[in-house]
Image (tube, helix red, strand yellow):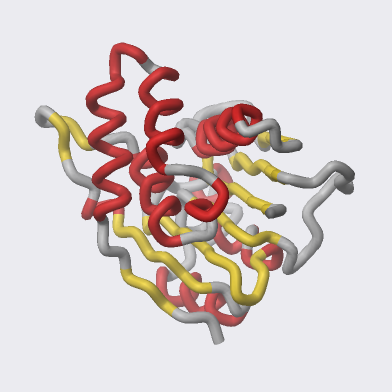
Amino acid sequence: MNLNIYLVGVGGQGILTIGEILSSAAMEKDLPVFFYPSKGMAQRGGFVKAQLQIGKKNVGPNIIEKGSDIVFAMETSEALKAVRFAKPGGTFLLLANFWAPTDVILGKASYPELDKVIGEIQKSGAKLVLISDKDLPEYEGKKVADNIFMLGAAMKHSVLNKLFDSADIDRIVQNRWKRASASNHFAFQAGMDYQPQLIAGE
């Protein structure tokens, strides 16, 4: 099984960590994996994107438009930059989170309404898995890591579960941060148990 995964967010959210975890899982299964992270402004809040291709022996330098089986978008406005890569019939995971990108802070761009972003994703033909950042649970009084929560949701609501076992992803997450293994295990399981809003593509 081959998978193209496109990830977008802003610096400080941990969007690249999702790609790194999935890359580790692919390598454990001896699957070919190509991970291409790219950052905008090298600071917290700058645009961050990555492309992850799994299972292909020969790959091009970039995922083509409408070629991504799964899109992870951890910031509402930045999600618009990934819409053109969403494959009709694929899965688009959106964390409805307001984290003002640099262009908005500098007054170079306005912030889009959530309904507009949802509409653009629907037009792509991908299934939208909408996650509200307000729904993230707490562990010992602190909100769980949103990227790990989102990864758990992806394991439940995308074709990732056809390629990887959730127990293996959970183990990789826990081993990556020994001191935070309990909280990250909780975040991952909470993401898998979460009931997001599912919106069909047009």
Name the foreground residue: 76 vs 147.
147
Above or below: residue 104 compared with residue 117: above
Q: Position of residue 163 (x, y in %)?
A: 57, 49
Q: How many numbered tags mark residues here?
A: 0
For the point 34% across and 13% down, the residue is 178
Q: Quadrant of residue 43?
A: top right
Question: Extreme bottom residue here?
Answer: 202
Name the foreground residue: 93 vs 69.
69
Above or below: residue 86 compared with residue 89: above
**Residue 151 shows in the view:** yes
For the point 47% across and 81% down, the residue is 200
Q: Position of residue 174 (x, y in %)?
A: 36, 23
For the point 38% across and 65% down, the residue is 130
Q: Position of residue 76 (x, y in %)?
A: 46, 58
Image quadrant for the N terminus? Answer: bottom right
Q: Would residue 172 appear left or right of 163 to someone viewing this image?
A: left
For the point 32% across and 70% down, the residue is 197
Image quadrant for the C terminus? Answer: bottom right
Q: Would residue 198 appear left or right of 158 to someone viewing this image?
A: left
Q: Would residue 16 appear left or right of 57 to someone viewing this image?
A: left
Q: Position of residue 142 (x, y in %)?
A: 17, 31
Question: Extreme left residue here?
Answer: 141
**Residue 45 shows in the view:** no
